[in-house]
Every structure is written in C-alpha cells, then in structure tokens.
Image (spheres, grey):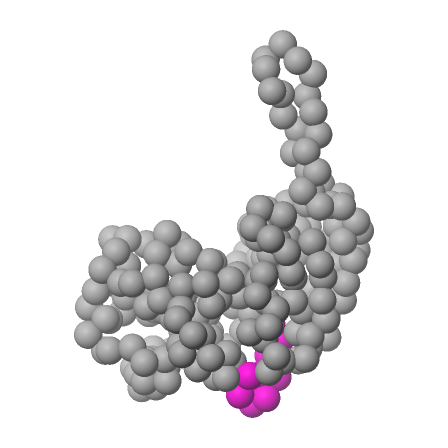
Amino acid sequence: MLKVHHLSKFYEMKKHWYLKKERYVVFKNINFSLEQGENLMILGQSGCGKTTLAKILCFLEDPNEGEVLYENHNVHKINKEKQRLLRKEMQYCFQDQKMALNPYKKIKNLIQDGLENFNLKKNDEVIFDFFDRFGLKRQILECKPYELSGGEASRIGLIRALILKPRLLILDEITSMLDAKNSNEILCFLNQYQQKYNISYIFITHHKNLFDKFKYKEIQF
C-alpha cells in the first residue's frame, strides 16, 4: 500500500546574511513499506524529525530526495485534485488539535465539513456513537475549539479522521493530551477498529510501552 524510498529532508539557511548557506539535515535515506492492515511506529525524542516525516507522507511538505508511493502513485507528483481525493484514504491527526482545528467554527460544523469535502452522507448516529465511545458529551458539538481541553480536542480530531473511514491513519503523539485512563481506552478502541476494518496506523511517539496491544514495524530516529 505505502512505499518510501530513500527519503531525505534538509533545509538550507544562513546564520548571517554575509555567510554561505549551511545545510541542516532533518533525516536522510529513510526506507520502509507498509501493507494494508500493518502498523508502523516512528520513535524518537521531540525535535528529531518525526512530525516532518509524517507531513511528507501526507504531502503537506515535500521531500528533498526520494519518493512516497501510495498504491504505486508518487503522492508528490499527482495533481492537486487527486491529492485532495487521496486525503480521504490517508488521514493525519496532528499532535496539537486545538491549533489544527478552525477556531471560528463549531465542532459539529468541523466534523460535517470533512464529510462534505468528500461528498459523504452526514450521519448523526455515527457521530454520537464515536462521542459515546470516547467519553465526550454531546454538548461539545456546539462548542468551538478554544473551549475544549487538550484531551477533548485530540478526541475530536480522531473522530474527524475516523468518520471518513481512511485506509491509513497517521497519529502524531495521540496520547500526549490524554490521561492514562483515556489513553488506554482510545488505544483499545483503535485496536478493535483495526481488527474490524483492516486499517493501517502510523504511530508517532516516544512512549513505545503504551502500544503493546499492537504489532508494528519500527523506525528509530
């Protein structure tokens, strides 16, 4: 399903205007493949390039070298319309959902907008079911992102992704805003969801021990 060949990312910058540019390498020569239903864990401390790699996989950033192939299509070479349609199959949950969500819209509109973007039917019962599973009060649907806690925003971001039924879900520090109880419940749900729908996950984390429910390949940064 997903193949990454010789992927590298670097930035060129000047410390002062009169100096030559220096190259800052974020990561170099990353290679892996992922079949449908498989998982990948990207491990490493904060600032080591994990999130940059995830953004490249979702074509939010471009690599300097190498390629990302999804179903044998280079995701950085296809046109914008095909990229838009591909976003339904490849969803990315940012670490800080309060920053990622549009602050001017109510939560119910943010969820519905995702469905409308891909011409999917609105289904309140499905939304309510996710809310019940994730321990969220339905009154939150009338709130705006700044009114949510970090943990609530993380769960809303996850609902917005899952309701599209993606084939690949990239989860950036999904447990960082959750307490131990909610982290365990979310990960148990994701494990059950995978068994039912054969979804693939890419976990970005530096807490490997939390994911013992899953089988996964591993990349260490």
Question: Is residue 115 something that shows in the picture?
Answer: no
Residue that appears at 75% across and 50% down? 7
Quadrant position of the C terminus in the picture: bottom right
Q: Which residue is more in the foreground, 152 or 121?
A: 152
Compared across the picture, whether 162 is left or right of 8 comes to: left
Residue that appears at 60% across and 82% down? 213
Q: Which residue is more in the foreground, 72 or 198?
A: 198
Residue 91 to residue 162: above or below:
above
Main secondary-structure element of the magenta-colored stretch: helix
Indicate the position of residue 152 as horizontal and vertical percent values: 32, 68
Answer whether residue 200 is magenta in the image. yes
Indicate the position of residue 24 as horizontal and vertical percent values: 68, 33
Magenta residues, start to end: 191-201
Answer whether residue 137 is magenta in the image. no
Residue that appears at 62% across and 48% down? 49
Indicate the position of residue 112 as horizontal and vertical percent values: 33, 69
Residue that appears at 51% across and 62% down? 173
Question: Is residue 49 something that shows in the picture?
Answer: yes
Q: Which residue is more in the foreground, 111 or 217?
A: 217
Indicate the position of residue 109 as horizontal and vertical percent values: 28, 65
Quadrant position of the N terminus in the picture: bottom right
How many numbered discs sit on the rendered protein? 0
